[in-house]
Image (tube, rainbow, N blue to C red):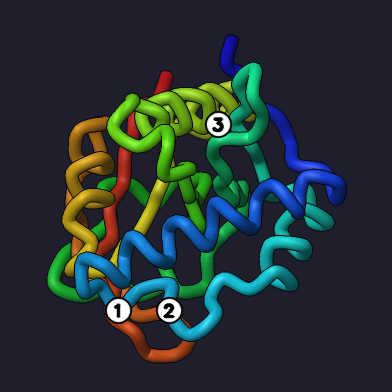
Amino acid sequence: MNTFRPATPGDLSAIMPLIADAQRFLRSMGVDQWQNGYPSEEIIRQDIERKNGYVLTVAEGIIAFATVIFSEEPTYQIIYEGTWLSDSEYGVIHRMAVADAHKRKRVGESMFRFIEKMACERQISSMRIDTHEDNIPMQRLIRKTGYAYCGVIYLADGNKRLAFQKTDLF
């Protein structure tokens, strides 16, 4: 049975190989996202310490990780070439990674369902996410789970990202 739960500091050693899997996967597709050491172990540790890191486990252990934040995302304040679907309170999904051995097994879809359930429990009816314009597999997953393309945002370092939102979660 799959269990979605908050990550603990003890999970870090199981999470970092998932991040490495994702970095290799993106590099193999020629996607310049999550390269140059991002996200670092320190960033993931901070996600966990801030209670924003979540893992999906199965009998054999942790198979996926995501950062979920239920507060405003500064880089989402300005959106270009479009508009957000809603200005109401929203949650944000960042740094999602799935173990290579579990890719193409609908783990990403499960992660979205668990995250959206958390949003509903907090009475938040909207989620946002962004990804690199060349990260086609993530864009497919985002669209498949009902998110609509809203426009372009720029990260603090100036990198361009495609922004998506899903509203009416409940």
Q: Nearer the viewer, residue 86 or 94?
A: 94
The amino acid sitting under disc 2 is Gln
The residue at the far left in this view is 81
Q: Disc 1 vs disc 2: Cβ atoms closer than 8 Å?
A: yes
Residue type marked 3: Ala
Q: CA distance from mark 1 to mark 2?
A: 6 Å
In the image: residue 12, left or right of residue 1: right
Disc on the earlier residue, 2 or 3? 2
Image quarter hosting the C terminus: top left
Q: Using residue 154 as the reference point, say whether residue 92 is left or right of it.
A: right
Q: Nearer the viewer, mark 2 or mark 3?
A: 2
109 displayed left or right of 12: left
Q: Is residue 1 above or below residue 83?
A: above
* Residue pictured at 59% horizontal, 51% vertical: 67
The residue at the far top in this view is 1
Disc 1 target residue: 32
Where is residue 75 shown, x and y percent of the image? 45, 74
Q: Could you say which quadrant of the image residue 82 lies in?
A: bottom left
Q: Position of residue 129 (x, y in %)?
A: 38, 53
Q: Dot 2: what SS?
A: loop
Q: Identify the residue position indicated by label 3 in the image.
A: 119
Q: Which mark is residue 65?
A: none
- Drawn side of residue 39 relative to residue 147, left or right: right
Label 1 amino acid?
Asp
Mark 1, secondary structure of its residue: loop
Query: Residue visible at 59% across and 55% down?
Result: 17
Query: Which quarter of the rendering shows the N terminus?
Result: top right
Mark 2 → mark 3, Cα distance in angstroms: 30 Å
Residue position marked by numbered label 2 in the rendering: 35
For label 3, the SS is helix
